[in-house]
Image (spheres, grey):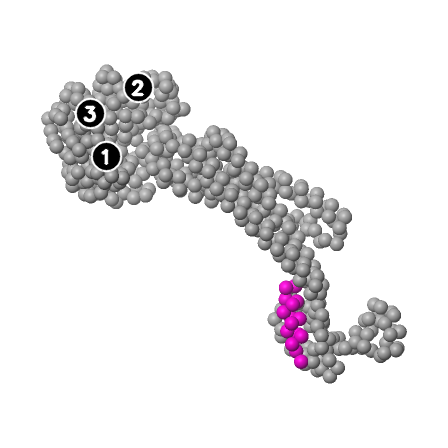
Amino acid sequence: MIVFRNVSLAYPASGALALDDLSVRIHKGEFVYLVGHSGAGKSSFMNLVLKRALPTRGEIQVAGEPLARYRGRRTALLRRRIGTVFQDNLLLEHLSAYDNVAFALRVTGVPGREWPARVGTALRTVGLEARAHARPVQLSQGEQQRVAIARAIVSDPPLLLADEPTGNLDPDHAREVLRVLQHVNLRGTTVVFATHARDLVDTFRHRTLTLRQGRLVRDDPAGGYAL
Amino acid sequence: MTYHFRQALLAMRGNLTATLGTLTTMTLTLLMLGGVLLLTLNVNRTLEGLESQVEVAAFLEGDADGAALLEQVRAFPGVREARLVSREDVLAEMTRDYPSTAEAVSLVGNPFPDTLRLRVGRVEDSRPVAAALARLPGVEDVEYGAGYVDQAVRTLTTVRAAGYGLVALLFAGTLLSILNAVRVAMYARRREISVMRLLGATRGFIRTPHVIEGVLLGLLSSALALAVLVPGYLALAERVAAFAPVFPVVRDLGALWLPLGAVAGLGILTGLAGSLLATRRYLRELE
């Protein structure tokens, strides 16, 4: 699903490496933790996959196709195939949970008649069907993050990138979010979960990639946080 | 499209100060443009009137071959019409227009020479045609309405050019104002735009509400400008026609349609161009 071959990314201002000669392959249907301290390169990894940044060196493939081939309008089409969830849930405050999720369908041109069924399914998946009409301020932070997940999966993307989605949550809400992401993964979606929450990684074991100063220092198929 | 239209209206309402500022600048610019276009229309009408009246006259020497000279001047560029008037015909004309000429002629004989009378295509051609005539052997003197024609043409052309210059400056100001309004609107939507980009919205989709905003601003400004310009001009034209009928003020709607249409068209076009430019530029900034 994702292939990095000798990928480096330098910060434009300082020239320091955010990622240093990273080579890794994430297979279709996997659930992978990306762990490391702040500045280890987790977000840089996500940004490269989303084509929000371009590698200084190396090659990246997503869904079998080199990222370099995605230009202009094709970049938008690439992003439609990748669900994203961030620490800041990026929900739109003036919209209800339903409308926030439907927003993903609206901006990608999905006909309005398909929205109720698809949004309903997505909200049901994250356990928030009953809160469809609540605005973000009326939801707990855990619920907000689940709405963000619903928005990320409503288009049925084959890949979901979650960058510190539990960073602002208490342990209970964090586990709740992780359970939802595992459920999404069980439906066949590849999930890459960047986190520095040791307890989560140790509790729900999956393949774990450990980054340190931009380098991959450990690739543990059995999982577990080892820094 | 309903979504884009609603977003455009929300953006305009959300940034009311910038919207009103742009609307005012744009309306004033279009009013100015309309004024200059209507002035040009009237100037052109006046020049056409002058052109149809301007005549260049060449007085021939006694032994000049008038017929040969007539053939020569007909080939001059800018000459629309040329004819040779014999000294007898000139005398007859003068006697008809000024009966006292007959008395003078009885004392000194016919003082008038054979004369070539020319009409030019454009009033600006009078001077070069007169200069060319004066150089011909057999031509004693040349006369044309140089004094008032040259002065009128120079003044009207300067007024017209100054008007266009001013309108060009105002349009530059309007464009900057639109850029600013769209920038403010896009900045206010930056979170939404950032989410859109992540969700896979195309640039076109993100830009559309702001382009609609620009077109709406253009449309509103054009409507406001025309609402002031049309009744204002017609009232002024009526007064000029009543008090100074010598000026051929244009009042027929057939002729007014073009400059007024240009005001509406340019308003919408400026809104469209400004918003396209702004969204292209500021979307890059937000990425």
- Where is residue A198 drawn, in percent x and y? 17, 22
Which quadrant would residue A77 be assigned to in this image?
top left
Tell me: A161 left or right of B186: left
Examine the residues drawn in magenta and state their main secondary structure.
helix
Q: Mark 1 vs mark 2: same chain?
A: yes
Q: Which mark is residue A141?
A: 2
- Where is residue A104 drawn, in percent x and y? 34, 30
Q: Earlier in the sequence, mark 3 or mark 1?
A: 1
* View extreme (front): residue: A14
Tell me: B164 left or right of B101: left
Residue drawn at (75%, 82%) of the image: B62
Q: Which mark is residue A196?
A: 3
Which numbered disc, 1 or 2, marks the residue closer to the eye?
1
| Residue A143 in the image: above or below residue A190 | above
* View extreme (bottom): residue: B63
| Label 3: few (<14), some (14–19) or many (≥20) C-alpha neighbours in 10 Å | many
Q: Quadrant of the image for the N terminus of chain A?
A: top left
Q: Which mark is residue B105?
A: none
Q: Is residue B128 magenta?
A: yes
Secondary structure under badge 3?
Answer: loop
Q: Chain of mark 1?
A: A
Q: Which mark is residue A44?
A: 1
Which quadrant would residue A186 be assigned to in this image?
top left
Query: In the image, which residues are magenta?
Result: B123-137
